[in-house]
Image (spheres, grey):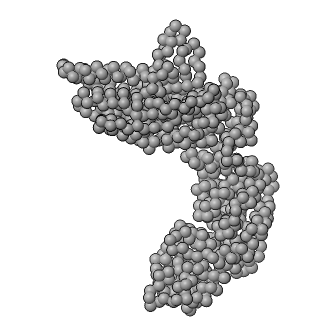
Amino acid sequence: MPIKPTQLGVKFLFEQNHTFAVPKYQRGYAWDAEAIDDFIEDISRCLKTREAGGEKSHFFGGIVTTRMPVPNSNRSNYEVIDGQQRLASFVMFIAAVVRGAKGVVDNLVEKDRLSAKETKAKKFLEDTIESLLRIYLTYRDEIELAYVEVPKLKLSVADNEFFQHVIDEKAPKPDRASHERILDAWTRLTRFVDDVMLRDDTLWDNANRLKLLVNSVFAKDCTVIFMCSDTRAEAFQIFQVLNDRGVHLTDGDLLRASTMELLDSKPLLLIQDKLSETWDSVLAYPPAEVDSYLRWYYSSHEGNRPKSANLADQFLDNRFNCLGKEKATKAEAQEVLEESVRMDEDFAKLRTLGEGDWPYQDHSKVVSWDRERLRMLVVHLKHTNAMPLLLSLQKLEPDKFAEAVAILERFVFRFKTIANAHISPMTKVYLQHAKKIRENSSYALKELRNDLRVLIDNTVPDSVFKANLAEVKYLPRGGNGHIRYMLITLEDYLQWYEKSAQGVPKCKNKARVFDFSNTTLEHIYPRSAKETDKDSDLEEIKHSLGNLTVFGPDDNDAAANKSFAGKRPILQESDLKLNRNIGVEVDWTAKKVTQRTQSLISMALKVFMP
């Protein structure tokens, strides 16, 4: 059946002969304080415009549903695929208005007499309360010759009872994050109603403001696009094209819905409940992170990148093994749960890795210098492309993981940071080894090192790397982190280089760990030399690699913009041997800058190899 999107006012959406229900496999209420404040502001803006005699429409996005018949009833029940955040917030808003209006009316009981005008306003408030209850909050259904009151909106199993108690003012106690968000939204909405909607002592003014809200703002100004499908599959295909304010739906939400529905039968309810809890944890990260984690997780386990489209289907097919199935057996349900638990555990690892934090509790086989390599790779070199491989590498012992990170760190600086080579061959190698690690308990890092060296030989041989390094220059407007990183790393490996420079590069002094964020680049010949100290030859090459070094914060403050003669004592006393080597020089000339550039490049050719 063709889907016909319909734009209509919120009042018209609710006053039809139907109810809404959020299926239990959907996530909980997700709007945070910022989202609900924006929602209130949108409604408030429309109301203020109406009070000033104007009109201001606001589009609140889409509602995607599937029609679900109700046995022995004439009403239609719409299963909400997308839009529960809006619907729940609208219902809470109306419930807050009803609460506030009832409070105004109840306070009038204490008065002995009302004027004719006040009596009219009171009657309007009472009638409006009944109207709002009937349109937005409850539906009077007739089932088998009996009338029953049912909620106009039911949330998912995890949230519904709490939600209904909140709008009925029964002060429930929250026991999950979505409950906390519902309660916070209710608090903000009732505060708005009390402080803005019904702020006047004048009964007539409050009644008129409520009239504008009900008959103009909600009936005409606040609109949504309503879309109804006869099948869930069709509804799932269209839900992503509609905006969900501030809480974008992800492939993870679709995976949750699909797997929960697969387990939707009485024999599987216990497993389904555990699956729901696991999905709550998996999808607790910001949507953008969920999208990245899904791709990294899939790549790490499958050994190839997922296609950009239909990620959820690829997961259902290759990870959950349930694509196209309508219902799961108990064994299949248990496999789905176990896969979701793996995702939950690996997402936590990815969060740790992404922040550059060491992922092992055991520090006995590594030192601080080893652990800092991970931060250098992920945070300072911003090499998130290695995340699937790092996730697999965590299956190795901590010392092997540290060795692998150091390999990747040196490789990526040469291959990507300096040469800016295409990532496709690099990614292919990463994912091949991610898969190998998971399949081979005796995996040796020598395999990774060899494959990365083949990439270096084919793409960034010494001639290319040398030419690119010769072009490295300090940029006065920033973006010099790669130079700082290079000099720090060369200092780390200097003892190995000066001794033999044979075999795999090794840091001989791991007791010293550089705090990257507290180091600065310093020009040896000043960046802004005084007129009396200027050298025309050095001015032309002052931003080249050979005229740059790394200082700590105290060194930098002391050096400031001094001439070489002024900096020389600081260089001589530096903890860095690269600096002490400069301090040996009696003067600083263009020739010496050129010589130092070549010296640093020669060292880099040896150090930045896997």
x then y, percent, for residue 391? 68, 53
On screen, residue 177 above or below 114: below
Q: Residue furthest bottom?
A: 586
Q: Residue at x 33, y 20 (%)?
A: 127
For the point 33% across and 30% down, which residue is it? 212
From this view, report whether residue 69 is shown above or below residue 306.
above
**Location of residue 223 by image quarter:** top left
Q: Nearer the viewer, residue 172 or 550?
A: 550
Residue 358 placement (x, y as % from top left): 62, 57
Q: Quadrant of residue 578?
A: bottom right
Front residue of this view, candidates 346 and 459 = 459
- Residue at position x 50%, y 83% from top? 526
Residue closest to the far top: 145
- Counting from the top left corner in percent of width and height, residue 413 is at 66, 67
Depth order, front residue of 542/565: 542
The quadrant of the image that shows the N terminus is top right
Q: Nearer the viewer, residue 8 or 442?
A: 8
Q: Reply above or below: 277 against 407.
A: above
Screen quadrant of the C terminus = bottom right
- Image coordinates of residue 241 in percent, x first then y, are 57, 40
Question: What residue is shown at x 52% (from left), y 70% (from top)?
Answer: 478
In this rendering, position of residue 192 left or right of residue 65: left
Q: Is residue 305 above or below residue 100?
A: below
